[in-house]
Image: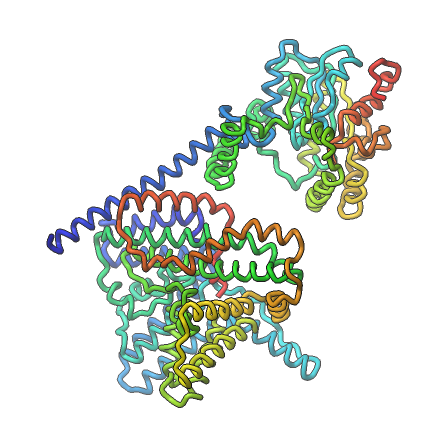
Amino acid sequence: MSETQNDLKIDKQSKRFCQIFLISWLGAFGLIFLTNYIVNPYGDYGTTFFRPLVQTARNDKVYLLSQLNTKPKGVIIGSSRVMRMEPDYLKSIFGYDFFNFGVNSAMPEDYLAILRHYEKRCGKPPEMAILGVDIYSFTDALPMDSRLANCPELFDNLTELQGDSVQKWKTQFTRHRKLVKENLKFYMLKDSLRSLKLELWDGGKGDANNEFISNGMMVDRLTKKQNADGTFDLAKEIEFHKSDYARRYNGFDSLSKIRCEYFETFLQECYEKNIKLLVFLTPLHPELISDLEEKTTFKHRREEVITYLNDQCGKKHVRFYEFSKIDSFQGIADDFHDGVHATVMNNRRIINCMIPRISGKKNNAF
Amino acid sequence: MLFNSYIFVLAFLPIVLLVWWSPLLNTRFRLISLVIASYTFYGWWDYRFVALLFISTLIDYRCGQLIHKSILKNRRLFWLVVSLISNLGILGFFKYSGFFAKSINSLTAWIAGGGEIPVPDIILPAGISFYTFQTMSFSIDVYRRQARPTESFWHFAAYVSMFPQLIAGPIVRYTEIESQLRSIPEKINQNQFARGIYFFVIGMVQKVLFADLIAAAFEPLMENYQSLAFVGSWFCMLGYTCQLYFDFAGYSNMAVGLGLMLGFSFPQNFNSPYQATNISDFWRRWHMTLSSWLRDYLFIPLGGSHGKHFRTLRNLVIVMFLGGLWHGANWTFVIWGLYHGGLLAAYFAIRSWKKIEIPSLIGRWVTFLLVVVGWVIFRSSDMTMCGNILASMIGLHGMYGSPEDWTVIQKSLPLLISLLFIVFCIPNAWNWNFKPRWQTAVVLGSLLALCVLRFSTESPFLYFQF
């Protein structure tokens, strides 16, 4: 073969190389994008072939509420800290069904979105709402939870957030751009593969530790198992929250104006719709409180939130209970799963303190 | 802008390639487009430094022409001195003025207990050491009549600012690229382009999948270097040794790849340096374009190795001292340069005194160990840190350290061993016989996709700071 022919052959091969490289590169992206979209490890895309790796309480609760034949008259609203509050226990007191709509990292915008969604889904507002408020939910340091944005049934109720059609389009565009960008990240692929492995090889064990039952309450299998094994280590769990919350409170310098506005709108709507509302401040483990008081702005923020809630609830004739310390509801320090999540028993004590007439009943928590 | 960023890979590079190879543009416009792209690339960090790059380019372009046109030797020398002073002045001001002021203050405080020169707070423009050395080589080569300056400003501006090698080399001399700039191909050379893809992806893998991963493993330990024990300190320093190599060689390979995609050939910058059998060999393989620059523009003018032995040893130490200082304005870099100068001088002295044949494997290990010790000085922010790490490396701070450190080390040990295996045993990208096969294209395409997924954690190249 002459040199020119050889050159031509190499040139042809090289051209093919470049084309295949480009196709492979784009193809690999496409494959990764599709895998992440289908597996949906964080519950972002609405695909439900596999269980998400993270708790997607907002989507789960929306689904569970839609499945109930008898629509509950009462609703529990709040963060993961109220997820163990028992609707059945409340039913025994009030005589009607409750639904636990506690969602992870709930902020005032979630409270409002949940209340409006409830009314939309059940056709009328709830007769009663029990709201567990976290001190930290009034921070400005944390943006709106992406899981709220990824739950259209809730997010669409927040017209305040969406503005006019241009702004709405802009929000949607930003959200989708973010979803595409997130999709093309290494950790997403890693978690998709993890999710696939759990589902296909480990029989979906990954998500079996925490589960919501039909009334929205969370069943914590892991702690139960650890308690049975004698491996549960509360001190270790609290230790984790010490560093986590110390970090969170470091950026929490004052109450968020916008979150206060959401909270006030929530109160106003409850007031206008004649919803019986009970508000309480969720408890923390005493050890975590003393650590936060020593190292962070917790003490000041707690006082500010209490003053604010007293003031706002007073204006709307809503009863507010300050239960951030366990002494205030005769709680027990050992009845915590970690630094911030009270057990079912401590939640019963909270209910008992809010509704004193329970003390004479059979289902007394004590 | 970083090579390992979404904006570069998904937008900047495709646009630049499309414009560069566009049949609608003539050579002049293509050069202009390349200069605009390069200035955009550079200005992405801080637009203010674009002016500095432009001024530096303008001065050397003009000086080059004046040196070339002047017949009188004194006049030629005058314009050369103007070029050198302006280049070294810019470099000195931006890079060394703070260091100089701090050093004077420390010295006067030590001698007389006072004396405060205000320490200027100047941001170091990215890549200033690299492009200054490039433009200086141009002026010197024109003075030596080894290069002929171009009449076209765009031609020269493209040489100085060419984005693939602007920030961290290779240091390309004008003589190496002059003819390429004069005859820019109008049609893509497919083979060259394919080789460009190959070098770019290999470099990206070296940076994103090797250097960044090992850095993530040892950097948390380095933060508490005081508590490192024997195993931890060796783990960290071997990790850093790998990170530095893959980071810098990765950048160089990407630069070469990008150059090839644009139709330019840049010189090789790394040739498996950790496989060197002696310290002189190491410097022929590590940052080769800087080594050859120092040799041709400093060591040889100082007399090279042609004079008496003492003079050669002195020249080696001076060159490495300045080489160390080039890397950064800190005494640790100066000491690192002197350390290597000392090693080179010792090697030269032993070799001239007696011809000793050392088995290559022993030579490799000894050289590698000496280089690792050098990296301790290089990595340390001050000599206290350096002394601390060296003490740990000889076992003065215990054997295993804390259980937490030990857990981290055990987790990342397979990665470190794999990387050491690659640097010791695998030929580098230049030595592989690249053939444009479809299988290679599929592998490289998938690897690049994997690298892009890891762009979320922004990690600049280590040599950007120099």
Residue A82 in the image: above or below residue B375: above
What percent of the width, then of the height, locates residue A262? 67, 30
Which residue is more in the foreground, A52 or B427? B427
Task: Give the left or right position of residue A126, taking residue B258 as reference.
Answer: right
Which quarter of the picture shows residue A4? bottom left
Q: Quadrant of residue B84?
A: bottom left
x 51%, y 51%: residue:
B414
- Image height check: is B203 above or below A110? below
Q: Is B25 on the left-hand or right-hand side of A262?
A: left
Of residues A69 and B77, which is closer to you in this image?
Answer: A69
Q: Is residue B415 above or below residue B93?
A: above
Q: Is residue B2 visible?
A: yes
- Residue at screen point 38% across, 89% down: B307
Is residue A244 rendered to the left or right of residue A56? right
Q: Report if residue A161 is visible in the image.
A: no
Percent x, y for residue A220?
Answer: 68, 26
Q: Please state the horizontal and vertical placement of residue A235, each as a whole percent of the image.
A: 76, 40
Chosen colour scheme: rainbow
Q: Quadrant of residue B424?
A: bottom left
Vertical comparison of B333 with A24: above or below: below
Measured as percent of width and height from the top left, residue A175 is found at 51, 34
Q: Residue at x 69, y 37 (%)?
A: A257
